[in-house]
Amino acid sequence: MPLIEYENLHLLNQPLFDDYRLAFDEVMTSGWYVLGRSVKNFEQSWARYCGTQYCTGVANGLDALTLSLKACQFAPGDEVLVPSNTYIATILSIVQNQLKPVLVEPELSTYNIDPAAIEAKINSKTRAILVVHLYGKLCNMEAINAIAAKKGLIVIEDCAQAHGAHYKGRKAGNWGSLAAHSFYPTKNLGAMGDAGAVTGNDAALDATIRTLRNYGSKIKYENEQVGVNSRLDEIQAALLTVKLKWLDAIIAHKRTLASLYLEGLKEDFIKPVVQDDYFDVYHIFNIRHPKRDALKKYLLEHQIQTEIHYPLAPNRQHAMKGILDDQPTPLADIIHNTTLSLPISFFHTADDISRVIETMNRF
Ligand SMILES: *Cc1c(COP(=O)(O)O)cnc(C)c1O
């Protein structure tokens, strides 16, 4: 039996290769390789897609997060609320701004930050809620924005896993004061290298991000701020503009595969919830099972690759000693110990998914 890979970036991108070659050729022959027409085009296209007024391209998703927090000009030691079960990048962006990450537990039903758990973590030092639309499902942004408005907090979104997802018709990237996007190759809108962006509707914040990403400079050789070099690469921007035309088809395919899993998998597996008002894009399709490790091994013996997102909660990482290890997170631990991500890429067929389902239902 052939191996069903968890992901294969060659196969995923293959239908786009001809268009990619044309886009690459255009940048190559233009002779303009940094912050040129391709970056501008992509920024406009991505803002339009997200429904925002502004978009600034940056080098990667971590920079998008780090610069978003930096643009808010919080004081060292200020606190930022963040879900306890996120990917480490979200936490690093807080730590690297000399801010304190305060972990908020997720809902076990959606894996997203639990609005009901937020208020208990707010104190006089709290400045922002950094939400993460994990696995491709939006957080309950109405509830979160209402708490933020009541308490005078800024909301920033980590949209790395949620390109094209929406809640009540409003897309990821259009709910917070700023929203960070990663176009890492495995994301739904993945580049062929590192890339990222920040979207939003605040002209002043966008101008700050734009300045910070390019040495703190608006006018050449005039530096207003202590900036960094985090420019979106011109070639990646050209490729992303090509891929953006495919994004809705990629999402539609993944949603079809997800519906097969949702219908076909037996009830022993805890499946992702489907809720009214939420359009989920299944960056990852995860199930939970108490014998997760045995299940993973069994599937591999049957030529099916799976992944774990993520094996260890951020507060259990060595790098977070002295930073997060005084904040226990039992719900995050449950998720990290039981979650398993099933194949759900653009190149997978309905037959692939049927084989995964049949094999799993025999476990
Ligand atoms: C991928 C990812 C990031 C980081 O993106 P990079 O482009 O790799 O820096 C941040 N947050 C989440 C939730 C992610 O999945």
Image: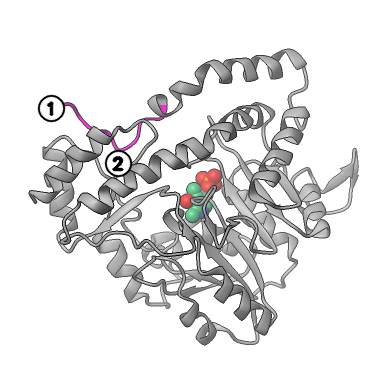
Mark 1 secondary-structure assignment = loop
Residue at the spot of label 2: 343
Quick check: can you spot residue 80?
no
Query: Looking at the picture, how far across and down is residue 237, in whole percent?
Result: 65, 32
Kind of residue sitting beneath label 2: Pro
Instruction: Relative to 85, say whether 190 is above or below.
Output: above
Left or right of 144, for residue 107: left
Query: Looking at the picture, how far across and down is residue 114, in whole percent?
Result: 45, 75
Kind of residue sitting beneath label 1: Met
Instruction: Relative to 142, say whether 170 is above or below.
Output: above
Q: Residues within 10 Å of mark 2 (few under 14, many from 20)?
A: many
Is 229 magenta? The answer is no
Q: Quadrant of the N terminus?
A: top left
Is 2 magenta? The answer is yes
Q: State yes or no: discs 1 and 2 in contact (Cβ < 8 Å).
A: no
Q: Residues within 10 Å of mark 1 (few under 14, many from 20)?
A: few
Query: Looking at the picture, how far across and down is residue 277, in whole percent?
Result: 49, 63
Q: Which residues are magenta?
A: 1-9
Residue at x-position 70% and y-position 80%: 152
Left or right of 271, for residue 45: right
Residue at x-position 40% and y-position 38%: 253
Left or right of 47, for residue 337: left
The prevailing secondary structure element of the residues shown in magenta is: loop
Residue at x-position 60% and y-position 39%: 195
Q: Is mark 2 within 8 Å of ligand 1?
A: no
Residue at the spot of label 1: 1
Query: Looking at the picture, how far across and down is residue 296, in whole percent?
Result: 18, 48
Question: Looking at this rendering, what residue extends furthest in the front direction?
Answer: 276
